[in-house]
Image (tube, rainbow, N blue to C red):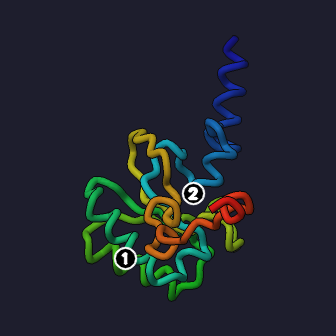
Amino acid sequence: MASDELKNHLDKGMYGTPLVNPEEQHKYLGTFRERCYLSMTVAEMNDPTNKAKFLEELEKRPEAFILINGTLPLDIQNQYIQLATKNQTKFTVVNDYVSEDPESIGLLIATKEAVNEPVIDVEEKYPTKQEEEEPKKKSFWNRLFK
């Protein structure tokens, strides 16, 4: 029994503490989905309208912190770091398990406790006016039988 404890201790020293649900933690920059308020992909971070949505969410969540993908270009990172600093929000640049893929997560507003937000994607949470006001197309039968 003592050898099992010794082996576990040595394994933790060599490989680190095992992660709980590692795929989810790798996708969400080292945290869990249930702790996130807002997420932005790398492609969404380039859109200037999303910066306003980001600031709106930051104002609602003073206890939150920001996780930024470390593979982003420095000019984009600096823009969001400056916004976080102006709002006195803690931030961390994450370099483990991140990618430059435009569909990977580039930024998260998260907290240390579970909040279970149903929608965290910035485009779904804050739709633009044009998306809301799209006229519905009439079906063939509605046009035929006015």
Name which residue type carries label 1: Ala
Which quadrant is home to the N terminus?
top right
Q: Residue at x 64, y 64 (%)?
A: 138
Give x and y (percent) for residue 8: 68, 28
Q: Which residue is mark 1?
A: 52
Rendered position, 138 above or below 74: above
Rendered position, 107 above or below 28: below
Q: Which residue is mark 2?
A: 29
Pair 1/2: label in front: 1
Rendered position, 82 above or below 87: below
Give x and y (percent) for residue 129: 44, 74
Residue 93 in view here: no
Q: Residue at x 39, y 71 (%)?
A: 53
Give x and y (percent) for residue 116: 45, 40
Q: Residue at x 65, y 38 (%)?
A: 21
Name which residue type carries label 2: Leu
Residue 108 in view here: yes
